[in-house]
Amino acid sequence: MQHDDLLVTALPQCPNCLSRDLVTSEESEEVSHGSGSSLIKVNVLIPVYRCNCCGMGFTDQNAENIKHDALCREMDVMTPREVRAARGNLTQHEFAIITRLGRASIARWESGSIIQSCSNDSYLYLMSFPDNLDRLSERANFVKSPVIESFGRFRKITPSQQEKLRAESETFELFI
């Protein structure tokens, strides 16, 4: 499920009896991430719904987003929304080509399914500045339109580059 805006406007349904006759309260919950010496715990207030018909208590995606963002803030890393914003108008694929980060990793960070490492977070933070992204674009020989086709970590050679390489190969001699 996508890590979307924190404000959810539609009142949810009870997953047990499908009633919308709900009471909302804010409750404190301890959220943790990691284990052992790298265990991080944070208390966060989340919205909890209680059904007036069957009495079931439950949370929704909004509560999950709040918990995830609180962990990110405690770890001093970017939230999924901030990771999405770092790539600007680029697609995940284009951003992956420029940064040499895996597109699947970018998707997981943006969806909130995993939290990026501190080193990747620092890199993403630097990429949130357009000048840095432009520098990497130039370094990657990236043309914004059309997108360079990518095969793993190798760029497809354009026809003009192929011609140049052919011409150079005709004058190449190997001395033994």
Image (cartoon, rainbow, N blue to C red):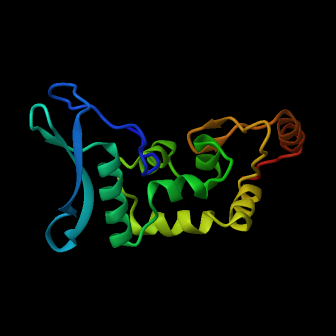
Q: Residue at x 76, y 49 (%)?
A: 174
Q: Residue at x 62, y 63 (%)?
A: 127
Image quadrant assignment for residue 8: top left
Residue at the far top in the pictured view:
17
Q: Is residue 59 left or right of residue 136?
A: left
Task: Decide: is 115 above or below 121.
Answer: above
Q: Position of residue 83 (x, y in %)?
A: 52, 56
Q: Position of residue 93 (x, y in %)?
A: 60, 41
Q: Is residue 100 visible?
A: no
Task: Decide: is 36 above or below 142.
Answer: below
Q: Residue at x 23, y 34 (%)?
A: 21
Task: Check the picture and name the quadrant holding the N terminus.
Answer: top left
Q: Nearer the viewer, residue 158 or 168?
A: 158
Image quadrant assignment for residue 150: top right
Residue at the far left in the pictured view:
55
Q: Position of residue 111 (x, y in %)?
A: 43, 45
Task: Decide: is 174 above or below 18.
Answer: below
Q: Nearer the viewer, residue 114 or 146?
A: 114
Q: Is residue 99 left or right of residue 159?
A: left
Q: Position of residue 108 (x, y in %)?
A: 42, 46
Q: Residue at x 22, y 39 (%)?
A: 22
Q: Nearer the viewer, residue 145 or 138?
A: 145
Q: Is residue 28 visible?
A: yes
Q: Is residue 39 left or right of residue 55?
A: right
Q: Is residue 164 left or right of residue 15?
A: right
